[in-house]
Image: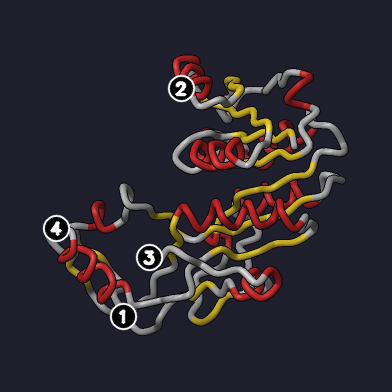
Amino acid sequence: MKIAVIGCGWLGLPLAKRLLDLGHEVQGSTTRDFNLSLLADSGIQGFVYDGTSHAQLSEKVKESEIAILNFPPSRSADYAAQVRDIIAQFSTETKLIFTSSTGVYQDLDGPYTELSPIIASHPVFLAEEAVRFSARKFTILRLAGLISEDRHPVKYLSGKQNADGQKVVNLVHREDVIATILTVLKHEVWQETFNVCYPAHPTRAAYYMEQAEKRQLLPPNFTFSAGSGKEIDASKFVLHLEFTFSHPI
């Protein structure tokens, strides 16, 4: 298929490379001109999109069969408008995969399914709505905290005062996110919203103390309050597509 990856960064670039390996034709965006050669070296047809400007996509990009929207809200004053703007430039036949966030859920204790309470004003949820009302086939993936071998939150928490050690962690490895996206494409799963989170949920204190020791880092200093916090339940995707998370957190 012809696939456009909007946002070839920490997640999007290895995803684009995997898509190439599977024989797809991949076009990918970068925020800076000097990264175009990096994409080209990987076989990706690159173009510049910084996540804020009015993107003028080429006719070739607009005709992509799949558009994977993977750019963050941090650069945009109105993320939902930006998502609407870029979707509008694609063919009405283009199918959409949007990488959302479990941050759209309200911060309450207990398991969270895709039907749990939402922060309706959250910019990422408003962007989800832009995808849902785009009159295109779509799948929305609400990603938990992202990790990889070279990127782990314990590095930023090391030695810092950190509240709520009793709350549980909600994390997922980058490779499992890529596998999730490839599974959606393989099985043509559309008009769905899925949580994407590794099924183990240790407490923050237990988990980050262990991870700090493993990496020989100064552990965070935790305080403890009542409640376990939200626990993201990804069983809908697991059961619907017989998916197995293969990279433990």
Label 2 sits on what residue type?
A: Leu
Mark 3 lies on residue: 249
Q: Position of residue 42 (x, y in %)?
A: 50, 27
| Residue nearest the viewer, comparing 232 with 246 | 246
Kind of residue at disc 1:
Ser
Q: Which of the labelled discs sits on residue 77, or is there none?
A: none
Residue 176 point in image, percent of width and height: 50, 58
Label 2 crowd bin: few (<14), some (14–19), many (20+), radius 10 Å: some
Residue 28 is left or right of residue 64, and the answer is: left
Task: Tell me where residue 88 sits by quadrant.
Answer: top right
- Residue visible at 60% across and 52% down in the picture: 100
Q: Which mark is residue 38?
A: 2
Q: Are marks 4 and 1 in contact (CB under 8 Å)?
A: no
Q: CA distance from mark 2 to mark 4?
A: 33 Å
Q: Earlier in the sequence, mark 2 or mark 4?
A: 2
What percent of the width, then of the height, locates residue 96?
Answer: 74, 45
Q: Is residue 87 left or right of residue 73?
A: right
Task: Give the crowd class for mark 3: few <14, some 14-19, many >=20 residues within 10 Å.
Answer: many
Query: Which mark is first along the chain, 2 or 1?
Result: 2
Residue 33 appearing in the image: yes
**Residue assigned mark 4:** 217
Residue 149 vertical placement versus 218 (above, below): above
Amino acid at dot 3: Ile
Looking at the image, is mark 2 or mark 3 earlier in the sequence?
2
User: Circle 1 sits in a helix, a strand or a loop, which is it?
Assistant: loop
The residue at the point 17 percent across, 67 percent down is 221
The residue labelled by disc 1 is 225
